[in-house]
Image (cartoon, rainbow, N blue to C red):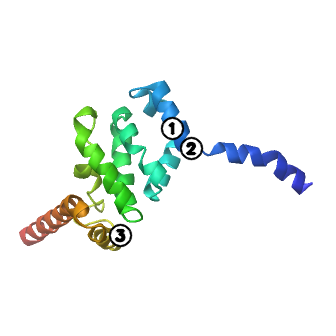
Amino acid sequence: MKALLYLLFLPAFTWAAITPAEIQHGIQKDGNHAFARNTPDGDWREILNNISAGKGEWIALAPELAPVMDRQHAIQLGKALYNALLPNAKETLAVLAILDQHQHAYPFQQGTGTSCLPPLNKAGDAVENQSVYEQTRLALLDVGPQGADCLWTMEALAEEVKSASKIRDAAR
């Protein structure tokens, strides 16, 4: 009986996962901003999770996603690309270079300037996860010169936050 139920529900589970090809089709079909509005939350989470995991075929979708994103989705995409730097810096940096070249075409900024900023803690006075920050730094150093702009952006924010925190602490 369990085997029969498994066979009945297996197709439903295999069809549930969205693919990069389906996303591309949805972007072409729905166009500007409609894609972001029409994408179910579960599909959007899957897109972000796959990008964050460093899966190249998902990271490669970012230049197609950037022009059709609303503000909230653009912020989430930027964070997913930051997360993708650690597992797949090389492909993520290649996509960020494309985003940098075409950022004037996006309603919300995308590229190195936003995706290389490490998330801050709730107080805004430190990098959220220092271990991930350090590992991401090393991943950027490992890819060579193409990681320089992203590394500079990351380190600049981290140093600015440290400096502001010291000034705030001294004023107390």
Mark 1 → mark 2, Cα distance in angstroms = 6 Å
Q: Mark 2 and mark 1 in contact (Cβ < 8 Å)? A: yes
Sooner in the amino-acid sequence: mark 3 or mark 1:
1
Residue 51 lies, with reference to residue 155, above or below; the image says above
| Front in this rendered view, residue 11 or 24 | 24
Task: Specify the quadrant that holds the N terminus.
Answer: bottom right
Q: How crowded is mark 3: few (under 14 residues within 10 Å), some or many (20 or more)?
A: some
Q: Mark 1 and mark 3 in contact (Cβ < 8 Å)? A: no
Mark 3 → mark 2, Cα distance in angstroms = 28 Å
Task: Tell whether 6 sits left or right of 140.
Answer: right
Specify whether residue 124 is in view: no
Residue 54 lies, with reference to residue 77, above or below; the image says below
Task: Tell whether 36 sits left or right of 14.
Answer: left
Q: Mark 1 points at which residue?
A: 23
Mark 3 → mark 1, Cα distance in angstroms = 29 Å
Task: Tell whether 30 sits left or right of 140.
Answer: right
Q: Name the residue under label 2.
A: 19
x and y percentages locating residue 32 in the rendered image: 38, 27
Q: Which amino acid does label 2 sit on?
A: Thr
3 vs 1, front mark = 1
Q: Which residue is drawn at 6% across and 68% down?
A: 171
Q: What residue type is labelled 1?
A: Ile
Task: Tell whether 35 sits left or right of 100.
Answer: right
Q: Residue at x 35, y 39 (%)?
A: 66
Residue 132, labelled with which disc? 3
| Front in this rendered view, residue 121 or 75 | 75
